[in-house]
Image (cartoon, rainbow, N blue to C red):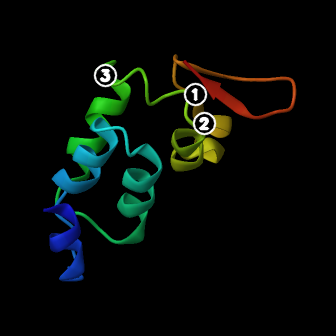
């Protein structure tokens, strides 16, 4: 269903699509899709990431590429993440 929906090339994505992809284990694809076009509901994806509902997503490289680490450097990071010795964020 998702592939059929995406084949229509929507200008605004349904927010449920990246959320379902991430929840079903297609983390890289879900994050990439969420950044490829605006969604009609970003809060659906974002609330699950920082509420503790999806802890398995935090350690993925796709998550640390998705978050605004410059923002964290300036204003403070998530409690679930820290910088490693190489200066990269690692989340758990």
CA gap between label 3 and label 2 equals 17 Å
CA gap between label 2 and label 1 equals 4 Å
Residue 33 bears which disc, if any? Answer: none
Q: Position of residue 74 (x, y in %)?
A: 65, 39
Q: Is residue 15 above or below residue 77?
A: below
Residue at 16% x, 72% y is 4
Q: Picture quarter containing residue 49?
A: top left
Image position of 68 (left or right of 5): right
Q: Earlier in the sequence, mark 3 or mark 1?
A: 3
Q: Nearer the viewer, residue 43 or 72?
A: 43
Residue at 82% x, 33% y is 87
Q: Which residue is mark 2?
A: 72
Q: Is residue 33 above or below residue 87?
A: below
Asked whether the viewer can see residue 11, the reply is: no
Q: Residues within 10 Å of mark 2 (few under 14, many from 20)?
A: some
Element at badge 2? helix
Q: Is residue 74 above or below residue 10?
A: above
Q: Earlier in the sequence, mark 2 or mark 1?
A: 2
Element at badge 3? loop
Residue at 58% x, 40% y is 64
Q: Which residue is mark 3?
A: 51
Q: Picture quarter containing residue 89?
A: top right
Q: Which residue is mark 1?
A: 77
Mark 2 touching mark 1, by CB under 8 A?
Answer: yes
User: Which dot, 3 or 1, sits closer to the camera?
Assistant: 3
Q: Residues within 10 Å of mark 3 (few under 14, many from 20)?
A: few
Q: Earlier in the sequence, mark 3 or mark 2?
A: 3
The C terminus, quarter of image? top right
Image position of 85 (left or right of 39): right
């Amino acid at each position: 269903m998702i592939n059929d929906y995406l084949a229509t090339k929507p200008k605004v994505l349904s927010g449920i699509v990246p959320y379902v992809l991430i929840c079903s284990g297609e983390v890289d694809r879900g994050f990439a899709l969420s950044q490829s076009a605006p969604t009609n509901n970003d809060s659906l994806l974002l609330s699950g990431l920082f509420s503790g509902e999806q802890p398995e997503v935090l350690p993925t490289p796709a998550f640390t590429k998705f978050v605004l680490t410059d923002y964290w450097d300036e204003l403070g990071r998530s409690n679930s993440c820290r910088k490693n010795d190489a200066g990269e964020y690692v989340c758990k």
